Amino acid sequence: MKKYINKLFILGSLLFLGSSCDSDAELTTLEAVNFPSEINVSSTKIVLTEDTAEDQVLLVSWPEVTFPIEAPVTYAIQFDLVGDTSGANAWQKAKRIEVGTDVLSKTLIGEELNKIAVDLGLPIDVEGKLVVRVEAAMDRKVFSNPITLTVTPYEKSVVFGEIYMPGSYQNWAIETAAALTAIQKGVYQGYMTVATGAGPGFKLNTERNWAQFYGAGATNSDLQNMSDTDFVLPGAGSYQIKVNLNTLKWTATPYSWGIVGDATSGSWDNSTPMSYDHQTKTWKVTAVLVPGNVKFRLNNSWTINYGPKNTTDGIVYLDDQGSHYVGEGGTYEITLQINDVDPASTGYPPTATYTITKK
């Protein structure tokens, strides 16, 4: 009996192998993806100074990378020290800048590249070596060959001073006008909120008096000494204001901190905007909350967000997953105080302070 069972087993095995060989199924492997050619940089030797802080100092461009799947490709550039690009921890300390989907170049201004160089540890006013490479990502990440740059960074001067922004938003009272703080020599930056119904006009004064002021010149963006023409903001809302007395230009960029979370009316999808109190330099909002969680984020996006580690110490942390739990529904006054005077060159601070108080 045992002999017949063994014969049947052998016959079954042969039939299985035969059917496997006749199968039309194909064994597939992950297709190799590479950069089709080298990346390019506008210069491999760059001397950075405060005078070139806002100039375009480096253009990195690259060829389109083709993946086997028809889908958008996301590109980023990475900078690192030469000594940190090999070994088990290669590129782990790199400074990464996401460029976007199907974008094939990135331009950096002087202060951006200087911050990268200083953060990576290049000595001030001395030639140092950085390497740059491009990352392409879809179903996996592939990298270009790196290019070595010789970069001389500078030390940003400590600058002090303010200019002032009287306008319709606060009835032209120079004594209580918003102050813009010096972030570079001759460059000032600050924040403000124009309430709905308030006029959009303003001037720029060098002191808290009317001895010298600037108004609009040839265009709304141009500063002209002692011009009677008001500058005009786009309308109600919160803005980051930047004034450059070196170039006699100014800009207003929509900029608003807000609350987000399932305790808020917008839940986790839409932030409730806060208003900037320019006298106390605090973002504020009065809102109806339900039991749930609250966090803070910038410009209705998760790119920059803060969360607390607990509900007691009034501190929020950059990119922290925590949130403030509200146990009782009702009307709350919420404040956020953050030292983000010059995030473009110094980044956002690791912490900020907040209050959530039931009225």
Image: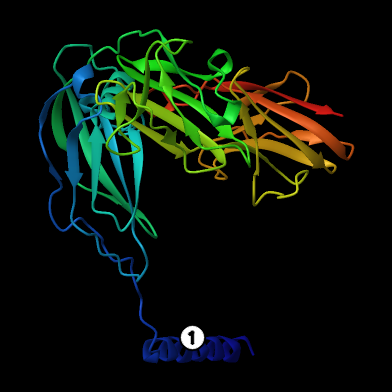
Residue 49, compared with residue 63, is above or below; it is: above
**Could you tell me residue 209's position as x and y percent?**
47, 10
Query: In this figure, what is the number of numbered marks?
Result: 1
The colour scheme of the drawn protein is: rainbow
- Residue for point 25% across, 35% down: 108
Question: Is residue 232 in view?
Answer: yes
**Could you tell me residue 344's position as x and y percent?**
39, 29
Question: Is residue 145 in view?
Answer: no
Residue 348 falls left or right of residue 277: left
- The residue that mark 1 highlights is 13
- Choose between 70 and 201: the one closer to the eye: 201
Dot 1 alpha-carbon crowd within 10 angstroms: few under 14, some 14 to 19, many 20 or more: few
- Quadrant of the snapshot with the C terminus: top right
Residue 27, compared with residue 90, is above or below; it is: below
- Residue for point 36% across, 76% down: 27
Q: Amino acid at mark 1?
A: Ser
- Quadrant of the snapshot with the N terminus: bottom right
Residue 266 falls left or right of residue 105: right
- Residue for point 88% across, 40% down: 329
Q: Dot 1 lies on which element? A: helix
Residue 56 falls left or right of residue 228: left
- Quarter of the view holding residue 290: top right
**Could you tell me residue 318's position as x and y percent?**
56, 29
